[in-house]
Image (cartoon, helix red, strand yellow):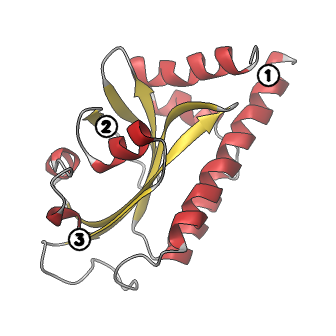
Amino acid sequence: MDQAYPLCEKAVGFAKNPNLYGFREWLPASTPALLRKMIDQIGAHEASIWMVDSEGGQLVTCYNTEELERIIVQPLSSGLVCKAYNEKHPVHHQGVHRYQDSSGKVDEQLAQKTQHQISVPFYLCGQLCGALSVVQLSSDFHSAPRAEVPWGFQEDAISVVAAAATVIAEGIEAKWKDVEGQ
């Protein structure tokens, strides 16, 4: 627990004072390739790592596979990625627009249409610090996907996303131990 507190405080600090590039330095060098492989395997378009800013009551994107240059926030009180965080278990939504707990805020900010989404809690040293989400996008809510991917996620995709979150977290923890000399 002693190691977990400073690591989680530092990690959620990226959400309190968003710095996309600072958070990337914490990630294992293998993270982009791992997320790309996961995206290809499950048929997603992109993935995001979100950290919690509990003081601000929101999740904040600290990493996105499409290398967004702006910070995206989602209030903890709404949205599917926050549901995974708040309920501390994975969520899998097919046809996102049909769910009343979908907020649409992120799609509005990015001028995109999310059709399907999987979000899993993201833990560091056993402490909940955020979420990892993957999405399938389309041009509108009734069109084909943007890229040639199988439409919709299979149920086993949840375990693939959860495993990726674990591998990334373990890499951050190992890097933290090296930096801090723990």
Give coordinates of residue 122: x percent, y percent.
55, 41
Please, what secondary structure does the residue beneath circle 3 have? loop
Q: Residues within 10 Å of mark 3 (few under 14, many from 20)?
A: some
- Left or right of residue 182: residue 82: left
- Residue 36 visible? The answer is no
Please, what secondary structure does the residue beneath circle 2 have? loop
Quarter in which the N terminus is drawn: top right
Question: Residue pushed farthest right?
Answer: 181
Quarter in which the C terminus is drawn: top right
Q: Which mark is residue 107?
A: none
Nearest to N terminus: mark 3 or mark 1? 3
Nearest to N terminus: mark 2 or mark 1? 2
Viewer-proximal residue, 154 or 170?
Answer: 154
> According to the image, label 2 marks what residue?
70
Nearest to N terminus: mark 3 or mark 2? 2
- Residue 161 visible? The answer is yes
- Left or right of residue 29: residue 12: left
Give coordinates of residue 166: x percent, y percent.
66, 49
Residues at marks 3 and 1, CA–CA distance in whole angstroms: 43 Å
Amino acid, disc 3: Gly
Viewer-proximal residue, 162 or 181?
Answer: 162
Amino acid, disc 1: Val
Residues at marks 2 and 1, CA–CA distance in whole angstroms: 28 Å
Q: Residue at 57% of width from left, 67% of height from top?
A: 38
Q: Which mark is residue 179?
A: 1
Q: Residues within 10 Å of mark 2 (few under 14, many from 20)?
A: few
- Left or right of residue 33: residue 85: left
Give coordinates of residue 58: x percent, y percent.
31, 28
Amino acid, disc 2: Arg
Please, what secondary structure does the residue beneath circle 1 have? helix
Q: Residue at 37% of width from left, 86% of height from top?
A: 148
Give coordinates of residue 108: x percent, y percent.
14, 49
